[in-house]
Image (cartoon, helix red, strand yellow):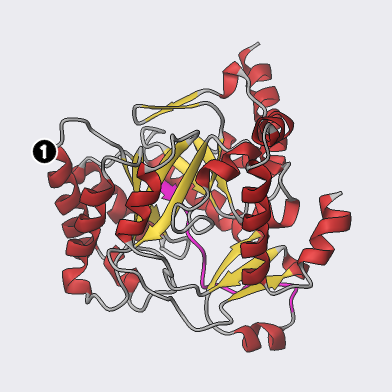
Amino acid sequence: MYKVLFRPLFFLIDPERIHHFTVFMVRLANRIPGMALLLKKCFTYRHPVLTTQVAGLKFPGKVGMAAGFDKNADFYNDFSVFGFSFIEIGTVTPLAQPGNPKPRLFRLPADQALINRMGFNNKGLMHAVSQLQSPPRRVIIGGNIGKNTATPNERAKDDYLKCFEALYDVVDYFVVNVSCPNIKDLDKLQDTESLGEILQTIMTARAGKAKKKPVFLKISPDLSLAHIDEILDIYRKTGLDGIVATNTTTSREGLNTSGDEISAIGSGGLSGKPLKERSLEVVRYICKQSGSAIPVIASGGILSPADALDMIHAGASLVQVYTGFIYEGPFIVKRIDKAIAKSLSALRK
């Protein structure tokens, strides 16, 4: 019903506007007595085989919502009814910022993809903290952290540390985002020296905490395998807990959308189906190089249960969806969890 009725209507409206409208409607539905419970029962699938321990956290299902959907921690509880076992809020920066000029989010229906150049638009760190302090959480929360656009790279570690310290008591795990292609020169923070400095700053701060919370690194799909090897070396030296693979890509290879339309859209990170094979390659490579010792959250190009199963069979512990949720609708999480449960149950027989 979603793809036949709702999606064609939604796709007639500007992507950012329909995002805000959808959020409003879901939040409104959750305010109706008994509706949240009904929605959760309809969209959630749980099975013992899906329960996954990653970095000390117990995830009841395999599927999470990727960062970028709930940038400000405004509606994570409302969207937990769609079966997500974890939701990653952010990217959060120390100060509020408007992001890049609009339009900045574009659909590529012929490719089941999106291009975005949002630019870390968010209401700032203290807004996210206040939102996470208020209601009891119904879902595991990850805090995706970044730097303000105006902060020069040589002071980036200060922004990451501010976010880390302020969010520490209100999230369950962290994701350090140095790979978004929509912040000028942010990708340069993936260089060995800069990345090592940021991660060491965060891990030193964590060492002084009474409770250890996991820290993951989100990497770009556009890295060479040699660069990934360097990051894996930093991973081991700093004592990180996992990797999120991958962010959006700047590549435009192999698209069905016309070159003229792509040129008119301009810059931005590509997500969705065209990203799947590269994300899978990165997941498989990390798991192989580490002997499956590094927990990997697969993100990028997951639009079906088959896509998710490919990631799990490649060694990923968990998967995340964003663009798949937009193209496939709210049943995508349940369908993926059912397929993974069936596959894992068969393997254990």
Does 199 appear above or below 341?
A: below
Residue 138 inside the magenta-drawn segment = no
Q: Nearer the viewer, residue 210 or 96?
A: 96
Would residue 47 be found to the left or right of residue 249 on screen?
Answer: right
Q: Quadrant of the C terminus?
A: top right
Instruction: Please indicate, yes or no, whether residue 254 appears anywhere in the rendered image.
Output: no
Would residue 145 be found to the left or right of residue 198 on screen?
Answer: right
Magenta part of the chain: 244-257
Q: Pinpoint residue 117: horizontal percent, then vertical percent.
A: 51, 75
Does 255 appear above or below 214?
A: below
Q: Pinpoint residue 215: horizontal percent, then vertical percent.
A: 30, 43
Residue for badge 1? 208
Q: Nearer the viewer, residue 5 or 340?
A: 5
Would residue 8 be found to the left or right of residue 214 on screen?
Answer: right
Does 119 appear above or below 301?
A: below
Q: Pinpoint residue 28: horizontal percent, then vertical percent.
A: 65, 49
